[in-house]
Amino acid sequence: MVQVISAASEGWIPPFTGLSVRQFRKLVGIVRARGAEQTGAGRRWGLPLEDRVLLVAVYYRTNLTLRQVALLFGISKSAAGRVVDHLAPYLVLSPLRRRRGPEQVLIVDGTLVPTHDRSIAASSKNYRYSTNLQVVIDADTRLAVTVGKPVPGNRNDCKAFAESGTDAACAQMAVMGDGGYQGTRVITPFRKPAGGALPAWKEQINTRHRRIRARAEHALAGMKNYNILRNCRRKRQGVYYATSGIALMRNLTLTTD
């Protein structure tokens, strides 16, 4: 029989969650402050809140099946599923709010997340059924600020930007993006004219644009260290909850030593 692994086993947290012990404790504090702690009457959870948060973090990081995660924590597969379903909404990013003046600049980029849920997926350029997730970061702090709702992976970024609600979430804020956002309000690089070349000053602006935009690509690469974004078995809103929760955990790695 596998014994229950407690969150108190501090040496076990970093390799299986991507968080330091301090970052994990802060994550638990966020979830507790949002009301995930069990109160009042009713059947109690078999695991304390710390271990339930740990279970979700391990699930996102390793992409083990629920049956495998359940064995690690000494609970049933159905109980592990209930833990993930219950806590996932408590781990998402807070709604985007303007934190500075009009000089605040955001960067948007899309990523394809392979998923088994065909209702939100489509055959995509990665030759798999995937969903398009739009992720927005702050250009200055490099923190993720919002994640769009999943749309089928055959949507290009300019359509996904609007359909996912990302455009509305970033209303009245300056947003940068790559050439895939042509035709939207997103600030995109200058396009090279057919059969011609860009003036030197436009090339310089494009170079600066690429350097800033790369911060979003780096953020997505960091999020993809959580293996659930490489083959997501969650359905419906679960894909969004996983992506947004991972964005929150990545933010903790940037803001908490």
Image: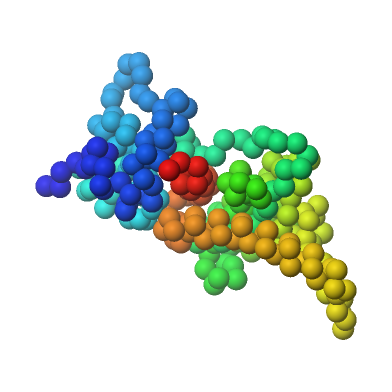
Give the position of the C terminus as an image quadrant: top left
Q: Position of residue 171 (x, y in %)?
A: 75, 41
Q: Would residue 90 appear left or right of 77 to someone viewing this image?
A: right
Q: Position of residue 49 (x, y in %)?
A: 33, 31
Q: Position of residue 152 (x, y in %)?
A: 61, 58
Q: Determine whether 210 is above or below 95 in the image.
A: below
Q: Which quadrant of the view contains residue 198?
A: bottom right
Q: Determine whether 217 is above or below 88 in the image.
A: below
Residue 164 visible to an observer of this rendering: no
Question: Residue at image x 29%, y 37%?
Answer: 51
Question: Residue at image x 73%, y 63%?
Answer: 208
- Of all residues shown, which one is farthest toward the top? 40
- Colour mapping used in the image: rainbow
Question: Residue at image x 67%, y 63%?
Answer: 211
Q: In the depicted view, which residue is nearer to us: 170 or 87?
A: 170
Q: Determine whether 112 is above or below 240 in the image.
A: below
Q: Would residue 174 appear left or right of 218 to someone viewing this image?
A: right
Q: In the depicted view, which residue is nearer to us: 93 or 89?
A: 93
Question: Residue at image x 41%, y 28%?
Answer: 32
- Of all residues shown, which one is farthest toward the left? 1
Q: Which quadrant of the view contains residue 33?
A: top left
Q: Position of residue 206 (x, y in %)?
A: 77, 66
Q: How many marks?
A: 0
Residue 130 visible to an observer of this rendering: yes
Q: Determine whether 62 is above or below 2 in the image.
A: below
Q: In the depicted view, which residue is nearer to us: 246 or 200?
A: 200
Q: In the depicted view, which residue is nearer to us: 107 or 140?
A: 140
